[in-house]
Amino acid sequence: MSFVRLPESVVSCRNLVGGEWVSPAGASAQEVRSPYSNALIGRVPLTTASGVAQAVEAAKAAAQGWRATPLRERTQFLQRFRTLLEAHLERLAHLAASESGKTVAEGRAGLLKGMEVCDFALSLQNLDGGAHLEVSRGVTCEYRREPLGVVAGITPFNFPAMVPLWLFPIAVTVGNAFILKPSEKVPLTATALGELMVEAGYPPGVFSVVHGAKPAVDALLEHPDVKALAFVGSSPVARHVYVEGSRHGKRVLALGGAKNHLIVVPDADPELTPQAVVDSFTGCAGQRCMAASVMLAVGNVQPLVDDILRRASRLEVGLGMGALIDRGAVDRLETAIAKAQADGARVLLDGRGKRPAGEAYANGHWLGPTVLDGVRPEMEAARRELFGPVLSIVRVPTLSAALAVENASPYGNAASIFTTNGAVAQTVVEGARAGMVGVNVGVPVPREPFSFGGTGESKYGHGDVTGPSSLDFWSQLKKVTRKWSARTDGSWMS
Ligand code: NAD
């Protein structure tokens, strides 16, 4: 394990438009500070509508030629990009960690997952042949997958590499020109991904990066030439993007926040379970949409709770667990912990005031693992997405009571059951409303080609961002019906 390496000098991010790095006209600049130390590591332009329009124009100019490029040729560009990702893995892992607060290992894991999505997109040249069928004598029907044109992706701070990589390798390989609007909190990694796309040789305008915040998003939502938009972020913004994008006639898939439940029953494996619970609520300092947030403790699972506390209290912030994104996040979480206490919860493990040793990280944004017990389902700690390393234990008498809590949540990203009994596992697999269900898995993210996506307020729109249904999101199927006359014109036929 190693501490993150912060960039050696302050990075001035620019937009990637038409293959060139440009400073958008009229954009103010915002500072980017590392969650590890609060040190200034970059500046990001806040692009206005005119800068967005410039990027869309360049993307539109590129889209025609890119659409006409055969899939096999498009795939070769992605192969080069994937090779570059692998070559730059360590540098990118540190960069993603330095601006998001992840550990370096978590930065690396995000990139590896992104490479898995590239592998899926690379397989399309062999697997996505469409369909062709003789439907009656002399008549054939055929599917042709065609790109949409200019499409965009808007991404959150917590996975600076992985979430963009969920989107653009597939969208671009399908034949679209893609505009990435990364989170203004983590623009450095997105810029580095753009540099690798340029190095991979993609034609100018096929991949663009537009930095900014709400005004840039709203300009993308309103621009008539943006045909589809994938969003990943918090639920209120996901809903805004879904409603506004749809109102402007776009195809939209908007992934939102989460409140994930781990159901732990008395027969759960005593070794595997406590570590999986701790990894789930402390990984990425709880700043991931698949993090465990509520443990539904069914019956007497006290020995498991004791072990969870033992393991979580040994975790060192800094090396073992990363930082929160900013001071506001620390304040918000400390307030939520105090509110839970006031509502009657007991703090079994208190992460407030924890910080790594030494001066270098004294100004970072830290909160150690925190465990609340006696949380009731109606309390805010059980209902609201906290997005930090806080586990709320809700005690329930039965499995069906646990499922009732899980299914009452308006979110629907993940739920997991920890048991050694197949029938218990199956009850949860069938009965949980979440879009991704785990059995003895704390973070049930499906591996590709199984797709990623929740339900309820965790996802607005149809289909998933990765896997087979993402192809339908980023393209349209043209249906061709052919009939050939049996008439022959000359003796040369036979
Ligand atoms: P966020 O919603 O604040 O920001 C996401 C993106 O939207 C950013 O690019 C940001 O610039 C933009 N944005 C922010 N406010 C906006 C507004 N009012 N109008 C238009 N655009 C706006 O999310 P975040 O804090 O960066 O990320 C954390 C959230 O993302 C958590 O809720 C987490 O659960 C969620 N998330 C969900 C998934 C998933 O797969 N469901 C994955 C990762 C993160």
Image (spheres, grey):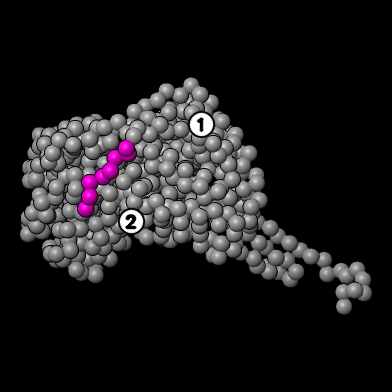
Amino acid on which the number 1 mark rests in the picture: Val
Q: Residue at x 60, y 34 (%)?
A: 57
Disc 1 CB within 8 Å of nearest ligand 1 atom: no
Q: Nearer the viewer, residue 401 or 42?
A: 42
Task: Please name which of the two marks, 1 or 2, marks the residue nearer to the observer.
Answer: 1
Q: Nearer the viewer, residue 448 or 372?
A: 448
Left or right: 348 with respect to 416?
A: left
Q: Residue at x 27, y 49 (%)?
A: 104
Instruction: Give the crowd class for mark 1: few <14, some 14-19, many >=20 residues within 10 Å.
Output: some
**Which residue position is annotated with label 1?**
22
**Which residue position is annotated with label 2?**
445
Q: Residue at x 9, y 42 (%)?
A: 350
Instruction: Give the crowd class for mark 2: few <14, some 14-19, many >=20 residues within 10 Å.
Output: some
Q: Quadrant of residue 182?
A: top left
Q: What secondary structure predominates along the stretch shown in magenta?
A: loop
Q: Report the span colored magenta.
A: 1-8
Q: Residue at x 42, y 43 (%)?
A: 192
Residue 291 locus on image (x, y percent): 26, 49
Disc 2 CB within 8 Å of nearest ligand 1 atom: no
